[in-house]
Image: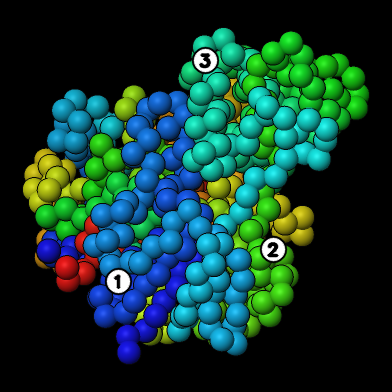
Amino acid sequence: MAILTALPTRVLKLHPTRCTGCLRCEIACSYAQTGTFQPAKSVIRVSPFEGHTSYAPYTCTQCAEGWCMTACPVGAITINAAGAKDVVDDKCVGCKLCTIACPYGTMFYDTDTRKAFKCNLCGGDPACADACPTAAITYEDVATADWLADFANERGLPLLSGAMDGAR
Amino acid sequence: MPARHLIIGGGTAGINAIRTIREEEGDKSQITLVSAERPYSRMVLPYYLDRSISESHVFTATASVLAGWQVVTHLGRRATTLDVKANTCTIDDGTTIEYDDCLIATGSSAVRAPVPGADGSGVHSFWTMEQARGVIAQVQPGTHVVMVGAGFISFTILNSILALGAKLTIVEIAPRILPRMVDDTGAQLVQQWLEKHGVTVRTGSAVTAVEDARGKKRLRFKSGGDIVADVVIMATGIRTNLEWLKDSGVKINRGIVVDDQLRSNVQNVYAAGDVAEGKDMVTGEGAVHAIEPTAQEHGRVVGANMAGKSVRYRGSLLANIVEVCHLDCASFGAWEDAKAQAISGLRKDRPAYRKFLFQGDRMTGAIILGPSSDIWTTNDVGMLKGLVQSRVALGPWKTHLEKNPFDIKPAYIGARATGTLLPETVLGRPSKAPGDTPVAV
């Protein structure tokens, strides 16, 4: 039996300084995941920074613990061929334990199907990375990491400290 | 001789321990499971109640899974005595089992209000599979169900009862609902929401008796005002199943007192889940966290340690979530700490509430309420968990949360919660997928 323990060899690398906030990743993701062009069902989310002058995408890190996977009481989250943690719809009952287990806020819950869903790297061909026109999302053979913290501090802190007030 | 592991209790903690033993040491040890019931997940019983899943979906480690793991089972049996000097356990059919190490994971049982008639026919608990079957047989469209107790257990089955078309009344002895999950403001918001959805809520009402009334049940109250119901569900708390260990020499306080490897005062006797009093990761104090995530993490840590690893548990995080008619309510950590600094945000226009508790610039507890249809509610639930779990220094980002309690993400990212959490694993290694436990058959 193949033992699915390996971390994914390729992950989504996020380059926030390249993001223009166009939301093509969200549209592509929702289409790949649900068959509808509905950013509300995208599992990659673009957020504004620096008072809506900068944007950055955010999604599941495919972490080593797999908090969602270990928390699931019915074994409905497994590791797919791309090494991504993936929800098996037939098994998920919608109890939301994964949503309080994942400390990254990257679990989602579909109120229509009453099931949890998340980034599964599209099985190895992530639609978000394909769709991004500025290569702000790339699918690379690197270790997963915190791609956004430096950016958030560089862009967000001046606003927070009031240092931007004089520039307005 | 191969090591002989004895697991007492086939709930979440016990089954996670067995799976982890097999992950760590393959099939070279002997595992014996004593369990009063066939292993199943209590968490999913509400979905069985509303018939959205079949009964077979509830069972976790089926006979074939247990056979694959090469587990010797004593199902439908309870442990009666533990002899920690002889390293033996006797069960209720008289069998004595020898062990090298043993896990006590006997969980808890539902308790009913100590009033006349509480054990009568038509009065149910909803805790075990058998009790769930009893409730399912009774609830039809139009049935008037009265739930006594407005705590977590009631709230997990509330949606299911409404989905079955029943009429629901909740009575609670305390002045407010969900006393152990959200604060007064949160409870008030949930109560208003429930009433808006047609549920009758009576707080501050002490049941004094449950009587038969021509095929129905009549509940009497201290303050008067009888209620007549078709079905009564008593969700008035749980009690740990530890009576059988009274004279065993295993040290019990509120639960079995365990160290950071989850060993009791007897080195080869471990405890996990509802019966264990282990470290609370936020307060550092001993606590019984009778919740699914603690049972799961405890079970895995014990399994690894039984397999000869030396895994130290960082402590468990109190975490609860319940959905009430499409309103998500969750709380984390020391949300009730009166000494902590608190920041809160309440929306007048929609059911949304947040409260964050801090020690300095680190978040130590949180409450969040919001519509399930709001994606940000679900994402924020997770980020709050991450902030409390990591207790990262928020620095200037705390100011952002003070000004914008509904905009958690920039603070979460700016405080470097992701980078702090990424190296964290419960067992010190990447987790394995369910169903991929290696056993040579």
Q: Quadrant of residue B47?
A: top left
3 or 1: tag closer to the N-terminus: 1
Q: Residue furthest right?
A: B223
Q: Can you say which quadrant of the picture contains the C terminus of chain A? A: top left
Q: Nearer the viewer, residue B229 or B421?
A: B229
Instruction: Give coordinates of residue B306: x percent, y percent.
Output: 42, 79
Query: CA–CA distance between discs 2 and 3?
Result: 37 Å
Residue B192 in the image: above or below residue B264: above
Give the residue displayed 45% in from the left and 26% down from the top: B50
Residue under pointer 3? B140
Identified by mark 1, the residue type is Arg
Q: Quadrant of the N terminus of chain A?
A: bottom left
Q: Name the element at disc 1.
A: helix
Q: Chain of mark 1?
A: B
Q: Residue at x 26, y 44 (%)?
A: A87
| Lateral position of residue B329 relative to residue A50, left or right | right
Q: Residue B243: which numbered mark, if any? A: 2
Residue A46: horizontal and vertical position, in percent?
30, 42
